[in-house]
C-alpha cells in the first residue's frame, strides 16, 4: 500500500519506516513514519539484512545528499573506492547517482575506473557552469559506469583544457547537487582548508587509507588536525575505509586499525581484490564476495548519514510487496 511519502519505482518493494522513538520530536515537528518504495536488492549483495537496510534508506535520501571522499595521503586508492562505492549506491538509489572528480591535477584516476563513452570531462562542466540546470545538460558531459554510476571525470588532455581548481570543481558540485539526489566527490588529499570545507559540507565525509601502519597513522593525525582546526563535526561524522593492497594484512596493521576505531566512528576494512587493483572500469557486481560484502558495509555507514531518519526500519521489520 502506498502513501504520500512513497517513492515510485518499477519492480520495487515498499517498506514501512518508523521513527527511532515513539512521539520523538525534531524541533517542534513530530517525526512521522515514512513509507518508501525501494529497489530490489541484487542477488550479488549481502549480508541480506544490511543490504536491505541500505536499499531502503537509499530510497529516502535527504535533499542534495553529498558524500565527499578524501584522504591524508595520495596513492591510497581513493578514486577506486569512489567508483566502487558509487557503483553500489547507484544500484541502490532509485534515481541517478553522480560522481565528480575534483582533483586539480591531470590524471586518469576516476576516468580509468568508470570508462569513457564520450570526450566530456569536468572541465566542460566548469566551462559551461551557467548551463548546468538540468540532468540533460549535465549528462552530456558525464561518463556512464558499468553499475550505472554517472561521473564527471578529470581532465587529462591539455591543449587549452586543464583540470579545475578546487573552487571551480566545488561550484560544479553545488550545481550538480541541485538536480541529482546523491553526489559523490573524489576530492584531493585533505591538505588545504578548501578540502576541509568540502568535507564539512558533506553529509558523509569518507577518508581512505591504505592498510599500512603509516597510512593509518597519517589518517589519525589528519582527524586530530581537523578537530584542532574547529572541524570536529567532520571527524564525528567521518567513515574510514581501510583498503588492503595485498591479500595478507600484517598483525601490526590490524592493531592500528583497532586503534583507529577509537578515533573515527565508523571503520570499514576493504579486502584485497585483484579486480580493484587493475586500472580498468569497475562493475561491483563482479567483484569477489568478500569485497561486495565490505562495500555494502561501507555503503551502510555512508547512507545512514545521508538518509531521511524517518525511513529507519525497526528490528525485524516486515517487507511489504508493492
Image (tube, rainbow, N blue to C red):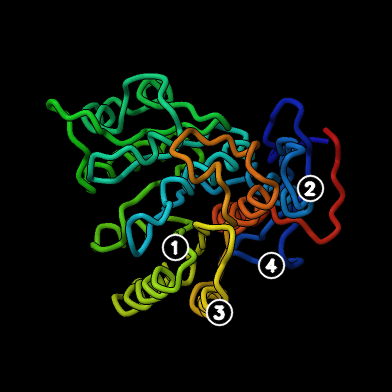
> Residue tagged by mark 1?
209
Q: CA distance from mark 4 to mark 2?
A: 17 Å
Give residue 270's position: percent from left, percent from top. Answer: 57, 57
Above or below, 230 relative to 244: below
Residue 3 in sight: no
Label 3: how many Cα within 10 Å (few below 14, some 14–19, many 20+) = few
Give residue 176's position: percent from left, percent from top. Answer: 38, 36
Name the outermost residue toward the left: 160
Above or below, 247 relative to 149: below
> Residue tagged by mark 2?
16
Q: CA distance from mark 1 to mark 3?
A: 15 Å
Label 1: how many Cα within 10 Å (few below 14, some 14–19, many 20+) = many
Label 4 or label 2, whichever comes before in sequence order: 2
Label 4 or label 1, whichever comes before in sequence order: 4
Total marks drawn?
4
> Residue tagged by mark 4?
24
Above or below, 65 relative to 253: above
Name the residue located 25 percent from the left edge and 58 percent from the top edge. 194
Q: Nearer the viewer, mark 2 or mark 3?
A: 3
Q: CA distance from mark 4 to mark 3?
A: 39 Å
Q: CA distance from mark 2 to mark 1?
A: 37 Å
- Mark 2 lies on a secondary structure that is strand
Q: Is residue 43 left or right of residue 271?
A: right
The one of 133 and 163 positioned closer to us in this rendering = 163
Disc number at residue 255? 3
The one of 197 and 151 positioned closer to us in this rendering = 151
Label 4 or label 3, whichever comes before in sequence order: 4
Name the residue located 74 percent from the left edge and 67 percent from the top edge. 21
Label 4: how many Cα within 10 Å (few below 14, some 14–19, many 20+) = few
Quarter of the image where the N terminus is located: top right
Q: Is residue 320 left or right of residue 294?
A: right
Amino acid at each position: 500500500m502506498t502513501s504520500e511519502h512513497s517513492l515510485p519505482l518499477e519492480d520495487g518493494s515498499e517498506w514501512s519506516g518508523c521513527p527511532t522513538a515513539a512521539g520523538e520530536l525534531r524541533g517542534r515537528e513530530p517525526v512521522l513514519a515514512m513509507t518508501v518504495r525501494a529497489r530490489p536488492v541484487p542477488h550479488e549483495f549481502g549480508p541480506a539484512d544490511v543490504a536491505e537496510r541500505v536499499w531502503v534508506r537509499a530510497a529516502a535520501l535527504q535533499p542534495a545528499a553529498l558524500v565527499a571522499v578524501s584522504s591524508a595521503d595520495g596513492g591510497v586508492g581513493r578514486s577506486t573506492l569512489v567508483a566502487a562505492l558509487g557503483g553500489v549506491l547507484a544500484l541502490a538509489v532509485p534515481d541517478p547517482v553522480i560522481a565528480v572528480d575534483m582533483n586539480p591535477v591531470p590524471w586518469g584516476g576516476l576516468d580509468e575506473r568508470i570508462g569513457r563513452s564520450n570526450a566530456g570531462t569536468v572541465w566542460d562542466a566548469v566551462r559551461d557552469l551557467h548551463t548546468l540546470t538540468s540532468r540533460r545538460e549535465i549528462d552530456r558531459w558525464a561518463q556512464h559506469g558499468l553499475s550505472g554510476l554517472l561521473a564527471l571525470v578529470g581532465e587529462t588532455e591539455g591543449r587549452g583544457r586543464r583540470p579545475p581548481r578546487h573552487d571551480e570543481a566545488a561550484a560544479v558540485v553545488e550545481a550538480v547537487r541541485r538536480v541529482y539526489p546523491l553526489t559523490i566527490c573524489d576530492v584531493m588529499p585533505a591538505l588545504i582548508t578548501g578540502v576541509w570545507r568540502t568535507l564539512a559540507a558533506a553529509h558523509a565525509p569518507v577518508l581512505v587509507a591504505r592498510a599500512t601502519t603509516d597510512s593509518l597513522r597519517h589518517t589519525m593525525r589528519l582527524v586530530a588536525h581537523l578537530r584542532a582546526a574547529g572541524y570536529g563535526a567532520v571527524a564525528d561524522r567521518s567513515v574510514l575505509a581501510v583498503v588492503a593492497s595485498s591479500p595478507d594484512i600484517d598483525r601490526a596493521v590490524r592493531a592500528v586499525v583497532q586503534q583507529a576505531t577509537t578515533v573515527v566512528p565508523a571503520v570499514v576494512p576493504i579486502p584485497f581484490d585483484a579486480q580493484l587493483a587493475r586500472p580498468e572500469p569497475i562493475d561491483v557486481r563482479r567483484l569477489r564476495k568478500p569485497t561486495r560484502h565490505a562495500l555494502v558495509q561501507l555503503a551502510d555507514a555512508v547512507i545512514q548519514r545521508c538518509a531521511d531518519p524517518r525511513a529507519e526500519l525497526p528490528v525485524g521489520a516486515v517487507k511489504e510487496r508493492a
